[in-house]
Image (spheres, rainbow, N blue to C red):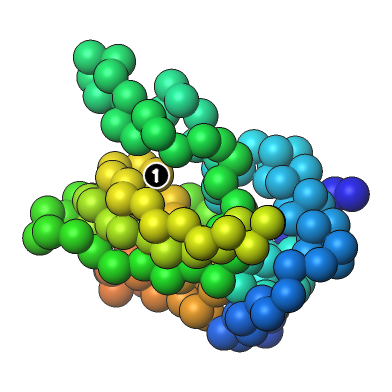
Amino acid sequence: MRRDIIIYGQAVLRQKAQSVDTVDAEIHTLVADMLETMAAADGIGLAAEQVGVAKAICVVNVPAEHDCTDDGERLNPDIAMPLIMINPEIAPKGKRRMSANEGCLSFPGITASITRPYLIVARFKDLHNQPYEIEVCDLLARVIQHEVDHLNGVLLVDRMSAVKRVSLSGALKRLKSG
């Protein structure tokens, strides 16, 4: 079932997600709803807070054609999509950072250049309660970092430069007031 996406200004977006202890039917339903909601919105990542649920769950679906070098070689070929991450934890690997424009389904029409680690290690459980550790780079790493930020109550507006925040103040105010 498609759920409404929570827009900037709603308190749930600032909540720290609660850890998921048991992967039960309710969690399976939530994940299915999140995948449907993300697809309907043409998104590539969605955190549970964005559908009003403060649980440590995010879903990611980076199309293969966006996970390639300029030569068409896959950057993260071993990672099957969609990626369902329960209780994810991430850590940067190496010192390389990259800047790129990011958008967010909770900030419709707003993008900002954000600098993030290029390579990360992510640890999480899947829907079968199986633990995973993956190393990912580029766009996939960026999306995972963005969604884990949501799980920690950190939003796009917190990562953008002060100058960008000021230039978007009117648009942000309109989103916040709904």
Residue 85 in view of the camera: yes
The residue most toward the right is 1
- Residue 13 on image: x %, y %: 62, 76
- Compared with 10, 93 (above or below) is above
- Compared with 152, 41 (above or below) is above
Q: Is residue 78 left or right of residue 33?
A: left
Q: Is residue 170 left or right of residue 46?
A: left
The residue most toward the left is 95
Please tell me which residue is depicted at 80% across the width and 57% down the height of the picture.
Answer: 28
Please tell me which residue is depicted at 84% across the width and 57% down the height of the picture.
Answer: 29
Most foreground residue, 88 or 67? 88
Please tell me which residue is depicted at 12% across the width and 59% down the height of the picture.
Answer: 94
Please tell me which residue is depicted at 67% across the width and 66% down the height of the picture.
Answer: 48
Q: Secondary structure at mark 1?
A: helix
Res 176 → quadrant: bottom right
Res 159 → quadrant: bottom left
Instruction: Classify 10 Å Cα crowding around label 1: few (below 14), some (14-19), many (20 and above).
Output: many
- Residue 137 on image: x %, y %: 28, 45
Q: What count of labels does the image hold?
A: 1
Most foreground residue, 34 or 25? 25
Q: What type is the residue that disc 1 sits on?
A: Leu
- Residue 74 on image: x %, y %: 33, 24
Q: Is residue 99 left or right of residue 94?
A: right
- The residue singled out by tag 1 in the image is 140
